[in-house]
Amino acid sequence: MNKNRKKIAIVGLGLMGGSLSIALRKVYKNWDFIGLDYNSKHSNQALCLGLVDELADNLDDITDCDIIFLSIPVDAIISISKQLTNIATKTTIIDLGSTKEKISKSIPHNIRANFVTAHPMTGTEKFGPTSAIDNLYKDKVVVLCDLEKSGDYQENLAKEIFTNIGMNIICMKSKSHDRHASFISHMPHALSFALANSVMAQEGSKKIIALAGGGFRDMSRIAKSNPTMWEDIFRQNRKNLLESIEAFENELRECKNMIEDKNWEDLNKWMNKANKLHDIIE
C-alpha cells in the first residue's frame, strides 16, 4: 500500500466541511475522503457532489482515519471529542470551531496531543453541502490556538495542510482568540440579526425592504446564518460577546447623542475616525 495514502474523515459536510474537501482534493490526490453527517440529506448530497468518496455511519467507522476534521457546531465538537478516545497515537484531529477556549479546555486529556484547535476566518451565510465553494479558504487567515497542548506531529501536519490550501497561519492563545473573535465576527453577527429584526418589526417592513440598497444588504446578509450554530457560539463566548456588544452600544449611544444635540462637527469627526479602520484592513 502506498504509505502516502491517507484516510481523511470530515465530520460535518456543510459549507466549511464541503469547501475544505474541495480545497484538499486539489492538493492531495492520493487521499481517501470519508464523510460523516447526521443529516442524511446532507450526507447523500455530499456523496453525489463528489465531496467525499464514501460515507460513514457513525464515529466508530472513522477512528482508524489518519486525519479527522470536525466541521460542526461548537457544542457538538466538545461532545464528539469525548467519544473519539479510541484513536491511534498519530491520528490528527482538527476542529474548525468559531470559539476556541472552551473547546480547548474540554478535550479529554488522553487525546489532547492529537488535537489541533483551529478557526479558519472565512465563510458565508449559506450552509449545507450545496453551498460548498472553490477557494473558500484561499488567502484567508486560520488561527491555531494553544499549540503547546498539541503534539509536534499534529501541529506540523496541521500547519502543512493549511499552508498547502493557501491559508495564512496565525497562532495565539484560545482566550485571546475568543476576545478578538467576539469583536470581528460574533458581535457583527449579533448586530446583523438585530438589524434584520428591527426592520421586520416596523409597519410596512416590506416597503422598507423594497428600498434596500447595497449597504443594507451587506449589513443584513449574515442574518441569514444558521441560528442553531450561532446560538452555540454565543453561548460559548457569552462573556466576550457581552463586552463587545457593550462597546458597540457605547459608540452607538455617542452617535445618537451627537445627533440629538445637533453636534454635527463632532459627528463628522467621529465618522472620520471610523474611516481609518479600512486604512488598516486594506
Image (cartoon, rainbow, N blue to C red):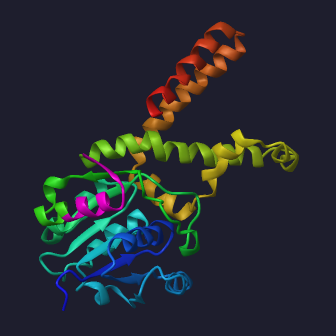
Residue plotted at (40% across, 82% down): 35
Counting from the top left corner in percent of width and height, residue 228 is at 53, 64
Which residue is found at the position 37% from the left and 54% from the top? 99
Pick the front one: 259 or 62: 62
Quadrant of the rendering where the N terminus is positioned:
bottom left
Toward the viewer: 248 or 51? 51
Task: Left or right? Give the position of 7 relative to 195.
Answer: left
Q: Is residue 8 above or below residue 75?
A: below
**x and y percentages locating residue 223 in the rendered image:** 62, 53
Q: Is 164 in the magenta? A: yes
Q: Where is residue 37 drawn, in percent x and y?
A: 45, 81
**Residue at 46 percent of width and 36 percent of height:** 244
Question: From which residue to which does the magenta span run?
Answer: 157-171
Q: Nearer the viewer, residue 157 or 200?
A: 157
Pick the residue in front: 105 or 165. 165
Q: Is residue 136 above or below residue 8?
A: above
Residue 198 on the magenta span: no
> Relative to 277, does residue 167 appear above or below in the rendering?
below
Res 263 seen here: no
Asked where in the image residue 3 lies, by quadrant, the reply is: bottom left
Quarter where residue 195 is shown: top right
Residue 217 x %, y %: 70, 46
